[in-house]
């Protein structure tokens, strides 16, 4: 008996043309002036996921996050009553960076320069000879930064947010709360720096057009008739956010050996419904401006791409888990999943940097996106809209 042939019905160019079809200016991917506008218009005025509550497991837990794109260092701490607060990691006395450690647990934070000491709520507790100053203690607390916890993720905002994270996510909020990462208790991560603009780096992971060319071994098996480029089945948009539903090649062989070892507790806790699909949960979802979450429930990972300059960026990839490993095989499987993903990312590096070198040379004025690179176009247009609004409001 002949097995039925797989069917693939992609969204047509006509369905996606509402986003526009014009070429995109190449300068937006290398021009220092445009990068400065992005710093002001986008990264100082958007909710940014910078961590997970599992990093702040108990009162007194803290993490430090350095956000180079806005020249800031942040101190995020869990207070005595369990609340999460964020502050600029700067002593208000003379501007010294307050906390050098990346993370830890302590009840107070003391400046190593003049011993000004602050509580978990950011308030000044003591300072030597403070009576000789001309201000009150309540005027000398750490400068706060807007912070919210949503779906297990810690979001910060450097401006005065007009919306909560939930309202900012819109219709995406409810399914996002169902993600396995909302219940995560552990993670492993790796990071990389790359000689490429943050949008160019981010775009590489938003399109499948390159899979069978760049990843013939790791991604090639998914590229088969009737979908030789492994294009997504569907694209969805929520304001500045977007997702794509990955096509499942029905002819792929079942995973064997270590690849088949999953964490059933994650699957049971998260379920297999909602945003991430009824079976494999293989949606690739992007939160504006620089955050993605991808993968089935048993091995979900995130990536954040941070700008370091107009022609350089850093990617941070995290795999989240629920609970401790139950045995050596499960531990090995988790490490194997992360190492495999890192190997795939390594295959991308040279072509991303080669693209940046070509764009920065000024050899081409525009980028031409095809219909299946629609998420790349959507990111540029969301960024450019904020840049245009900033220019308009600030006489640019």
Image: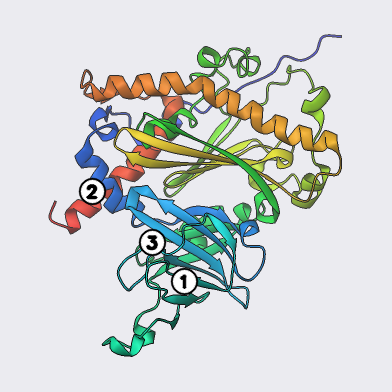
Examine the rendered structure and indicate whether residue 76 appears above or below residue 390: below
Give the colour scheme of this rendering.
rainbow
Q: Nearer the viewer, residue 40 or 237?
A: 40
- For the residues carrying marks 2 and 1, which lies nearer the camera in this image? 1
Local packing at callout 1 (Cα closer than 10 Å; few below 14, some 14-19, many 20+) is some
How far apart are the alpha carbons under marks 2 and 1?
42 Å
- Numbered-mark total: 3
Q: Residue at x 74, y 40 (%)?
A: 298
Q: In this view, does 210 lie above or below 124?
A: above
Quarter of the rendering containing residue 124: bottom left
Measure how far apart labels 2 and 3 are at the Cα level: 34 Å
Q: Residue at x 65, y 35 (%)?
A: 282
Q: Is residue 202 left or right of residue 234?
A: left
Instruction: Say few, some or many: other residues with alpha carbon within 10 Å of mark 3 (under 14 / 14 to 19 / 20 or more).
Output: some
- Mark 1–mark 3 Cα distance, whole angstroms, equals 11 Å
- Is residue 294 toward the left or the right of residue 286 in the image? right
Instruction: Return the residue at label 3.
Output: 97
Residue position for label 1: 110
| Label 1 residue SS | strand
Q: In x, y percent, where is residue 323? A: 78, 51
Query: Which numbered disc, 2 or 3, marks the residue that appears first in the sequence?
Result: 3
Does residue 306 appear in this view? yes
Which of pointers 1 and 3 lies earlier in the amino acid sequence? 3
Sequence-wise, which precedes: disc 2 or disc 1? 1
| Residue 41: % across, % down | 28, 52
Q: What element carries label 2?
A: helix
- Residue 318 in the image: state x and y as whole percent: 60, 42
Would you name the residue on which mark 2 appears?
388
- On the image, the x and y values in percent for residue 255 come to 78, 23
């Amino acid at each position: 008996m002949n097995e039925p042939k797989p069917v693939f019905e992609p969204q047509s160019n006509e369905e996606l043309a509402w986003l526009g079809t014009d070429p995109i200016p190449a300068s937006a991917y290398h021009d220092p002036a445009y990068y400065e506008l992005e710093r002001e218009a986008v990264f100082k005025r958007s909710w940014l996921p910078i961590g997970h509550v599992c990093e702040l497991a108990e009162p007194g837990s803290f993490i430090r996050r350095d956000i180079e794109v806005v020249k800031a260092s942040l101190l995020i701490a869990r207070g005595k009553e369990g609340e999460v607060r964020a502050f600029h990691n700067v002593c208000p006395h003379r501007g010294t960076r307050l906390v050098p450690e990346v993370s830890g647990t302590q009840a107070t934070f003391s400046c190593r320069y003049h011993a000004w000491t602050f509580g978990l709520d950011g308030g000044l507790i003591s300072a030597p000879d403070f009576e000789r100053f001309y201000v009150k203690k309540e005027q000398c607390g750490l400068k706060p930064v807007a912070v919210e916890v949503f779906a297990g993720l810690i979001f910060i905002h450097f401006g005065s947010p007009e919306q909560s994270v939930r309202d900012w996510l819109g219709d995406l909020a409810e399914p996002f709360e169902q993600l396995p990462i909302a219940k995560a208790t552990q993670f492993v991560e790796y990071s990389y720096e790359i000689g490429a603009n943050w949008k160019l780096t981010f775009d590489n992971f938003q399109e499948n057009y390159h899979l069978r060319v760049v990843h013939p071994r790791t991604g090639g098996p998914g590229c088969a008739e009737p979908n030789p480029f492994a294009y997504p089945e569907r694209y969805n948009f929520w304001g500045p956010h977007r997702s794509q539903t990955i096509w499942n090649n029905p002819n792929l062989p079942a995973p064997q050996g270590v690849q088949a070892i999953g964490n059933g507790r994650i699957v049971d806790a998260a379920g297999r419904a909602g945003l991430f699909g009824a079976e494999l949960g293989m949606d690739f979802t992007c939160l504006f401006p620089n955050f993605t979450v991808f993968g089935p429930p048993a091995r979900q990972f995130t990536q954040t791409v941070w700008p370091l300059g107009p022609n350089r960026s850093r990617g941070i990839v995290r795999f989240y888990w629920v609970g401790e490993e139950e045995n050596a095989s499960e531990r090995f499987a988790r490490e194997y999943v992360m190492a495999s993903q890192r190997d795939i990312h390594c295959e991308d590096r040279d072509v991303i940097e080669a693209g940046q070198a070509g764009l920065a040379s000024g050899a081409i004025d525009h980028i031409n996106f095809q219909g299946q690179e629609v998420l790349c176009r959507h990111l540029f247009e969301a960024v450019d809209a904020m840049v245009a609004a900033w220019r308009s409001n600030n006489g640019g």
